[in-house]
Image: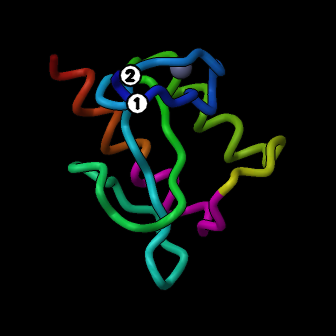
Amino acid sequence: MKPIRCCVACKSRKNKEDLFRIVADKNNHAIIDRNQNINSRGIYVCKSKQCITNLEKIVIKNRMKLKIDVENESMLEVLRELGEEIWEN
Ligand SMILES: [Zn+2]
């Protein structure tokens, strides 16, 4: 069975590989875990424009306590980067 994870924006459950994984590094900066193997607590978000935009809003409004402790600005940078990747496709 493939590992299933939950998108923090829309809460839907998907195969891990269909989601982006974001983790916090030692300095509490958000980084994209491309190979999904960094040994750190991570959050997952759908590879969709909508979920990335919604997660941006969540981070800006600080409405939801994310499971990882990351500095907001670095999180927004990561989301912008992921957003651009999706826009290109
Ligand atoms: Zn989602």
**Quarter in which the C terminus is drawn:** top left
The answer to whether residue 73 is magenta is: yes
The residue range painted magenta reads 68-78
Q: Residue furthest right?
A: 63
- Near-viewer residue (23 or 4): 4
- Could you tell me if the residues under marks 2 and 1 are in contact, i.e. CB atoms within 8 Å? yes
Residue at x 59% of width, y 15% of height: 12
Q: Quadrant of residue 67?
A: bottom right
Q: Which mark is residue 87?
A: none
Residue 28 is situated, as x and y percent measured from the top left of the image, at: 54, 76
Q: Who is closer to the viewer here, 78 or 20?
A: 20
Magenta stretch contains residue 57: no
Residue of label 2 = 15
Q: Quadrant of residue 83?
A: top left
Residue closest to the eye, 64 or 84: 64
71 versus 1 height, above or below: below
- Please tell me whether the stretch drawn in magenta is mainly helix, strand or loop: helix
